[in-house]
């Protein structure tokens, strides 16, 4: 039925013919109409059954010619195939069940993407993910019809024990917001009318404990909601343009997120999120069985739709029908929930009869063209991203007064390459299937000159690793966590320091440290390549080993990208995106969501292993001075003179933090408020401009319900990490 409040939007268009005035109803295919008129017109044509069907993840309305379009995972590449068999399964020639063949480009885990501190690069990665999604959607073959991308993960890694740390960009709201905005823009593109794909951010809100995630409550005040936990989502919507997100399993202050009033009152009404809000998988059942919010599923389904959740990732149809039949839910309330689904379908071009104006409509249509993942420039992008994600944690001099990195190839005859990840790339639960993989062993073999021999051992069984370590000039040991890309035992990781979705870590200790100690005893020229999805308390390694680098799992160009850094072809400039603590006892209780109680670099005041924003280089950068500070109406530009005074070309990540010594309200000790990754040749100087949005210097005023600037002094702290501050300046607001 047509609602009275919609009559204006779908009012008739009039034309005069033969002296008579006749009414013509708008056509939702008509691109000359406004988005709102097209959506309301379509909504008015839907039957109640079609509306209820649209509460699923499929945007299709077959009767009206609107095609099937669902969701893909895409945290670090389009997830088709992979350990989770995204896109379906089939039987191989031996009768074994395997994922369907569907290759995509796989980049480092999101945690590694964050380590690049490079928003432009993240946008390129997202654009490639979107390209491949369109390619599969629009091919004449393949039944993969999805353009809604479940990415990025805008959650914050407030605790390194969180099992899904691998899926997010880091602990800082500003850094995560900038990378979130970049990924949203890359996924959706820059066309004024159409989106390449739709970015659906995960998981709103404060979803950073896995143990008990289906029933626990993340408790914190309103200021932390706006200033910390919700900030990346807010920016993803208001600046990035995302119009889709997933509600988290957990509660906030006792109310499950999938029915929380903030979905409607804040995201919809205050931020303008007029697109998809979906539940997490199976969340309707958990609302009843885990949270115990309602006695029956029909009541839970009604409350979910009333909260403006328009896609329910669960069996829901019978529950919604019962809710409607019994008067618990109205058709108008269903309209309100699915209206955003139709808007997203419109932006993807699914409501157009003629696709000629859609700039993305021809991707995948040319059967003679190379698949996107086969293009050389795409493989080069994966290699570039991998090398830019490498974080050099330590590079001390050894007995001859030099550093082990970059490798001095003219002085090396044999390298002992050891460890479970030296010749193996492990894909995680949200990976796809790459068309090839270059392991660290593969990459080094290609990069090393003829005559340099690689001795390989997976582990130290029967003392083999120690033997080859003694024989070699140096040792490279590659170890870390296992990402457990399988659902065989969903809530079990046999190694306490491992974690994954549904399982938090119980330890920060590196399991292979005893092997590393044995190798170091056999050969003190030992380099640790920590291949991990999260931080470790590697105190012994930091104290004794001369060189340590950190990378993450999954990238198909892992070996080439790392080899580029180890051999000096690329100078590392990755940075930590979390505070690496010395000991697990340095962390507050896992369920303490008030970060003021000693969480993140903003509030932790003890000694750390590696601070937030930390990473070394093969060269040195001199921060000469703050050349100028320019205040504009809504922005502040800080110009910093930087010079590469070392012996290598390289990149530096210039970071600007702020402190509020005169604030009348509680503020963090320091906050990241600008950064830029900048390349300088050896001997080169540049003026680096760092821009601050003035409102990012404000705090959330709970009385006025807005961000508010305080007049007075703000300290600008500029340097190479949160603890390595090279320049200071004063700003008066």
Image (cartoon, rainbow, N blue to C red):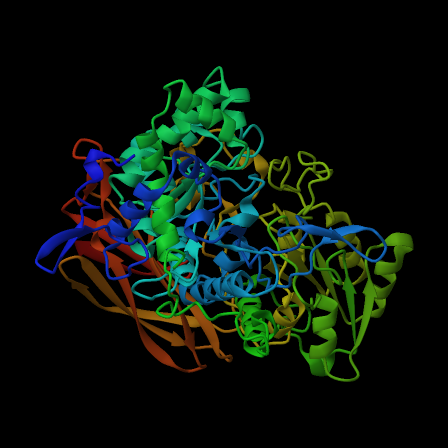
View extreme (left): residue: 19
Vertical arrangement, residue 594 with respect to residue 511, above or below: above
Camera-side residue of 126 and 351: 351
Camera-side residue of 102 and 571: 102
Position of 62 compared to 557: left or right?
Answer: left
Q: Residue at x 54, y 57 (%)?
A: 76
Vertical arrangement, residue 473 with respect to residue 722, above or below: below
View extreme (front): residue: 18
Camera-side residue of 179 and 115: 179
Query: Percent position (x, y) of residue 94?
Result: 86, 55
Camera-side residue of 320 and 229: 320
Q: Residue at x 21, y 60 (%)?
A: 636
Residue 379 makes an appearance in the image:
yes
View extreme (top): residue: 295
Give the total of numbered labels.
0
Residue 605 makes an appearance in the image:
no
Res 520 quadrant in image: bottom right
Vertical arrangement, residue 214 with respect to residue 269, above or below: above
Query: Percent position (x, y) of residue 195?
Result: 38, 60
Res 327 quadrant in image: top left
Query: Percent position (x, y) of residue 565?
Result: 60, 71
Quadrant that contains the N terminus: top left
Query: Percent position (x, y) of residue 87?
Result: 62, 52
């Amino acid at each position: 039925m047509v609602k009275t409040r919609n009559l204006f939007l779908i009012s008739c268009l009039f034309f005069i013919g033969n002296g008579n005035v006749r009414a013509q109803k708008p056509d939702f295919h008509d691109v000359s109409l406004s988005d709102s008129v097209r959506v309301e017109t379509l909504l008015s044509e839907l039957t109640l059954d079609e509306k209820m069907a649209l509460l699923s993840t499929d945007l299709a309305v077959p009767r009206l010619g609107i095609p099937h379009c669902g969701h893909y995972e895409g945290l670090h590449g389009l997830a088709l195939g992979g350990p989770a068999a995204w896109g379906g399964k089939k039987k191989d020639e031996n009768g074994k069940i395997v994922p369907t063949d569907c290759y995509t480009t796989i980049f480092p885990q999101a945690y590694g993407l964050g380590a690049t501190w490079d928003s432009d690069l993240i946008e390129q990665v997202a654009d490639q993910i979107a390209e491949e999604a369109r390619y599969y959607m629009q091919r004449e073959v393949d039944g993969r019809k999805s353009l809604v991308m479940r990415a990025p993960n805008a959650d914050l890694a407030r605790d390194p024990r969180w099992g899904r740390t691998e899926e997010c960009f880091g602990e800082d709201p500003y850094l995560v917001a900038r990378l979130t905005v970049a990924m949203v823009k890359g996924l959706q593109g820059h066309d004024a009318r159409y989106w390449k794909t739709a970015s659906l951010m995960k998981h709103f809100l404060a979803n950073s404990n896995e143990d008990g995630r289906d029933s626990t409550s993340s408790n914190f005040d309103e200021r932390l909601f706006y200033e910390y936990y919700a900030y990346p989502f807010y920016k993803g919507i208001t600046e990035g343009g995302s119009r889709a997100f997933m509600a988290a399993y957990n509660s906030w202050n006792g109310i499950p997120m999938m029915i929380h009033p903030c979905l409607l009152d804040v995201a919809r009404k205050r931020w303008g999120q007029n697109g998809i809000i979906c539940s997490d998988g199976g969340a309707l059942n958990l609302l009843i069985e885990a949270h115990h919010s309602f006695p029956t599923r029909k009541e839970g389904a009604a409350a979910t739709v009333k909260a403006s959740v328009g896609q329910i990732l669960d069996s829901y149809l019978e529950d919604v029908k019962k809710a409607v039949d019994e008067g618990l839910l109205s058709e108008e309330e269903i309209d309100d929930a699915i209206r955003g689904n139709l808007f997203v379908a419109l932006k993807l071009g699914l409501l157009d009869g003629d696709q000629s104006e859609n700039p993305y409509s021809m991707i995948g249509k040319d059967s003679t063209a190379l698949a996107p993942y086969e293009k050389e420039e795409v493989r080069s992008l994966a290699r570039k991203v991998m090398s830019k994600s490498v974080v050099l944690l330590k590079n001390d001099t050894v007995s001859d007064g030099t550093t082990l990195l970059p490798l001095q190839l003219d002085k090396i005859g044999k390298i002992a390459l050891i460890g479970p990840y030296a010749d193996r790339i492990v894909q995680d639960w949200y990976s796809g299937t790459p068309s090839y993989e270059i392991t660290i062993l593969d990459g080094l073999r290609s990069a090393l000159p003829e005559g340099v021999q690689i001795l390989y051992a997976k582990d130290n069984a029967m003392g083999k690793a120690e033997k080859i370590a003694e024989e070699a000039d140096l040792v490279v040991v590659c170890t870390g966590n296992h990402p457990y890309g399988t659902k065989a035992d969903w809530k079990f990781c046999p190694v306490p320091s491992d974690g994954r979705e549904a399982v938090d870590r119980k330890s920060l200790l590196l399991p292979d440290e005893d092997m590393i100690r044995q190798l170091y005893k056999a050969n003190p020229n030992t380099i640790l390549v920590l291949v991990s999805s999260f931080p470790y308390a590697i105190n012994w390694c930091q104290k004794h080993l001369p060189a340590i680098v950190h990378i993450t799992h999954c990238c198909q160009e892992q070996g080439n990208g790392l080899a580029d850094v180890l051999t000096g072809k690329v100078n590392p400039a990755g940075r930590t995106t979390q505070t690496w603590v010395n000991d697990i006892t340095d962390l507050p209780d896992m369920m303490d969501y008030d970060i003021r109680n000693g969480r993140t670099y903003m509030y932790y005041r003890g000694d750390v292993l590696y601070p937030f924003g930390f990473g070394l280089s093969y060269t040195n950068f001199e921060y000469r001075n703050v050349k100028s500070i320019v205040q504009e109406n809504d922005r502040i530009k800080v110009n910093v003179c930087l010079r590469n005074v070392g012996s290598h070309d390289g990149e530096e990540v210039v970071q600007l933090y702020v402190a509020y010594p005169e604030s009348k309200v509680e503020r963090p000790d320091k906050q990241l408020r600008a950064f830029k990754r900048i390349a300088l040749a050896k001997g080169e100087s540049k003026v680096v401009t760092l821009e601050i949005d003035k409102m990012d210097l404000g705090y959330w005023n709970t009385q006025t319900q807005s961000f508010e600037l305080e007049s007075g002094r703000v300290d600008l702290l500029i340097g190479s990490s949160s603890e390595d501050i090279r320049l200071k300046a004063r700003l008066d607001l």
